[in-house]
Amino acid sequence: MGTIILVRHGESVANRDRHFAESGENPLTELGLRQARELAPIVAARFRPAKVLSSSFLRAQQTAGILAEHLNLPLEIVQGIHERDFGSLKGLPYQHYWDLKKADPTYDPARDWVWEPPDGESREAVRVRVVAALQEVAARFDEEVLVVCHGVVISSVFAHVTGNWNEAPIPANCGLALLEHESGEFRRVVVVDSCAVTPSRQLESEASAR
């Protein structure tokens, strides 16, 4: 049985400023860099990954670079595990996410995961591409491998394995989740970081704080 160690990137500028990233070039903050540096010895003590893989987005690459250097492992960029495309919401405060949903007559709260912002992706679309990308990773590695990616990406993995979008958690920045696979199938996924919230709860709390 192999294990994919999923790591959410450290705090980005967009995370800090509470808005959707304008592009994949949104960097880590000083806190985000420190989070990655603090995570590195923890990963080294608990796991033995064969390689570090990263999303193509800058914030993930910065996090992965710090981890790879500490672990003395090569770093590879993997396509298909980038963050959800939020379309017209890019650069806007999180509150606009809820405003757009409320204004959309086609939005069904019972099937939130299929809703997509204009020119963007649904969470279900993210699940489809992420699962395909990680299945390729699983086919390559029977041992542990470290994959640095994004909040909705990890949430989509939970939804795929458990069949439940409503309780699919998003780990905190530099939080961990373990995805176990065997014979081409994803068997189990668990959050290692205790600071995890569901996507809906996270965004609701952010909206209520404004």
Image (cartoon, rainbow, N blue to C red):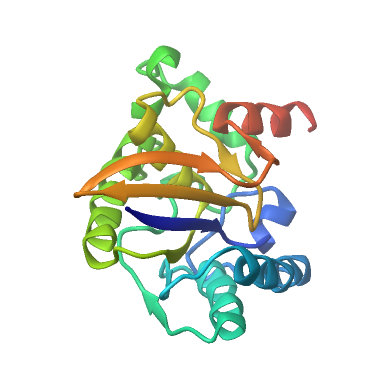
Pick whichever, 97 or 112, lies toward us: 112
Pick whichever, 182 or 106, lies toward us: 182
Pick whichever, 117 or 134, lies toward us: 134
Residue 65 found in image quarter: bottom right
Q: Residue at x 44, y 41 (%)?
A: 189
Q: Position of residue 44 (x, y in %)?
A: 61, 72
Q: Is residue 101 visible?
A: yes
Single out the residue that lies furthest toward the front.
1
Q: Position of residue 51 (x, y in %)?
A: 41, 75
Q: Residue at x 61, y 79 (%)?
A: 66
Q: Position of residue 5 (x, y in %)?
A: 47, 58
Q: Is residue 28 visible?
A: no
**Where does the C terminus fall, quadrant-wise?**
top right
Q: Position of residue 108 (x, y in %)?
A: 39, 15
Name the side, left or right, on which 132 lies relative to 23: left
Name the side, left or right, on which 164 lies relative to 185: right
Q: Tag count in the figure?
A: 0
Q: Residue at x 41, y 75 (%)?
A: 50
Q: Residue at x 43, y 69 (%)?
A: 54
The image shows residue 180, relative to residue 57, as above or below, that is: above
Residue 30 found in image quarter: bottom right
Residue 29 found in image quarter: bottom right
